[in-house]
Each structure stands twice: as C-alpha cells, then as structure tokens.
Image: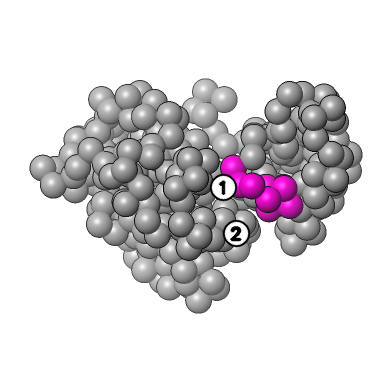
Amino acid sequence: MERAEDAGVYKLSDDLALVQTVDFFTPVVDDPYTFGQIAVVNALSDVYAMGGKPLTAMNIVCFPVKKMDMSILREILSGGLSKLREAEVVLVGGHSVEDNEIKYGLSVTGTINPSRVLLNTGARPGDRLILTKALGTGIINTALKGGLAADDAVAEATDRMLALNRTAAELIKDVEVHACTDITGFGLLGHACEMIEDSDVGIILYSSSVPLLARTEEYAHMGLIPGGTIRNRDYRMHMIERSSGITDEKLLILFDAQTSGGLLISVPEAEAENLVANMRKQGIRDAAVIGEVADGPKGKIIVE
C-alpha cells in the first residue's frame, strides 16, 4: 500500500502467494451488458499488472431496485460473467445493496510466485516504456455523457475497454520486466509518476508515439475533459517538464483518467521492440514504445 501497488500480495509459501484486488464504479456506457463486461475487465487488470493469474471473483453490486427494472441488473451481471468465462476466472459469490445509483465491479483473487511479483517501481535507466492500449477513454466517455460523441469514437473506446490485459500479461512473462502497472484513474502521466516517485531515475515520454483513440484530440479541444483528468494534472504537475510544443490539451490527454486501460511496462531496451512486435502479432494493435527511463532529472517526467 505504501507505493500504491495495483493489488495486494500475501505470501503463503516460498513458491505461492495470493494476489487480491477490488474495483467497482458507475456506468461508463449506456448498454448494461457492455458495462458489466468493462467493469470485470477493469477489475481483473490489477492482477495482471502484478504478474498474477486471476482465479476467483466475487460480484459487488449497488442497484436502485425501486427505480430500475431488475432486467437491467441481470444484463450487467450477464455481461460480467461473459468476461469472467473468457478470462477463465470462476465467480464464487458476491454481495449486493440497494443504492440510488448503479455500481458494479469485483473483488478478485489470484495467485503468483512471490519471486515473480511485478511492482510499479524498479524501472532502470535505459529501459524502454511500452503501452498496450490507446488513451482517451475518459475524454470520449465524457463526450458520450454530453451527447456529443460520434459512433466511431464510442465503438473504438468500447473495444479497448473490453479487451482483457491477459495476453499482454502472458507475453511479458517471457521477458525481463523491471516495473509494470495498469493505466486507470490517474492517467498515463499519473501512473508514470508513481513509477519514478522518490526514485533515482526520470522518464522521457515521446508524446507523438503515444497511441490515441479516434477523436480524442478533437474532443479535448472542445473542452470535454473529465474532472478527474484535471485533478490528475493539478496533483502531479510539479513532476512534469514539457517541451514548448506540448499544448495544454495534449498534456490533459496524457493525464486523462482511463477506464480499463492498458499496461505500462518498463523493460530493457534490447527486449522492447521484439515484445511490441509479439504483442501486435497477438492482436494488441496499440502496443508501442512511448518513452524511456533516464538517469535524470530524478523523479521528473520530460514530455517531448
């Protein structure tokens, strides 16, 4: 907890530990089935980010039973179950309460060898940073809530939010990984700051190499920015140095609060290009090298 890790790890023996996490939130899309799927993918991601294998899950449900038809809840749970089956995770129970607003997610338990736990710190100078999903879900979901999102933008954002990080997690088991985290509410820059906070290294971020969802820049220029994204920027801006060509809108995109984002992985330079190529072969089409770890300035991210 001291370093805001993605999940908790509890050692049972020399070669076995539990990985545990919990995550739930309000709907980010209109369709209840799709919302259930996204919530599950998002919750499982924390276990993948630690290098673990999720095994069991329990539903967490808040639902306004007096205001909404129970068929909506059935659709949410059905969507969630479909993704659990895809991930080969067993649903073993759950808990529900009456609430004025829908909320859904999971508590997840997985396993890992204690010697193979991936932390969100430990990046080394010379490492390359790989991102596995395009950014922009927060901005596009804000446009959706305002009735301004185009169908193609919503479809692409939904596609990424529905994609499990399972394949990426399996591929990185074959390479040397120095740090790993998933990109969620703190945005790319927020989670990258966690990677180097109070450390002896810094990050150079290649902003032009960061994959973006369709229309993300357009909606950012329109001011369709989530409140969480602005808070991310305000909280971490003291760790950011940007070149003259990085606009305020571009910076906000890099801080955009993501739902069910990709993995951010720090690997040796010699491993990076082959890992990206393998990811793309396996269908992770957004995978890209988006930066490098440097000797300095320590605890700073240079966005160029």
**Could you say where residue 80 lies in the image, as x and y percent from the top left?**
76, 50
Residue 29 in the magenta stretch? The answer is: yes
Residue 297: x, y in percent?
20, 35
Left or right: 178 as drawn, with respect to 244? right
Q: Residue 135: in sight, yes or no? A: yes
Q: Residue drawn at (23%, 38%), measured in percent from left and top?
A: 248
Q: Amino acid at mark 1?
A: Ser
Marks 2 and 1 in Cβ contact (< 8 Å): yes
In the rendered structure, which disc, 2 or 1, sits on the residue that comes first in sequence?
Answer: 2
Query: Would you place residue 197 above or below residue 222 in this image?
Result: above
Which residue is at 64% across, 34% downward?
25
Tag on residue 294?
Answer: none
Residue receiving disc 1: 260
Can residue 10 be seen at all in this image of the molecule? no
- The secondary structure that dominates the magenta segment is helix
The span shown in magenta is 28-37
Q: How many marks?
A: 2
- Quick one: 85 or 143, which is closer to the camera? 143
What residue would you read off at disc 2? 163
User: Left or right: where does residue 291 sit relative to residue 120?
Assistant: left
Secondary structure category for the residue under label 1 = loop
Side of 195 where 241 appears, left or right = left
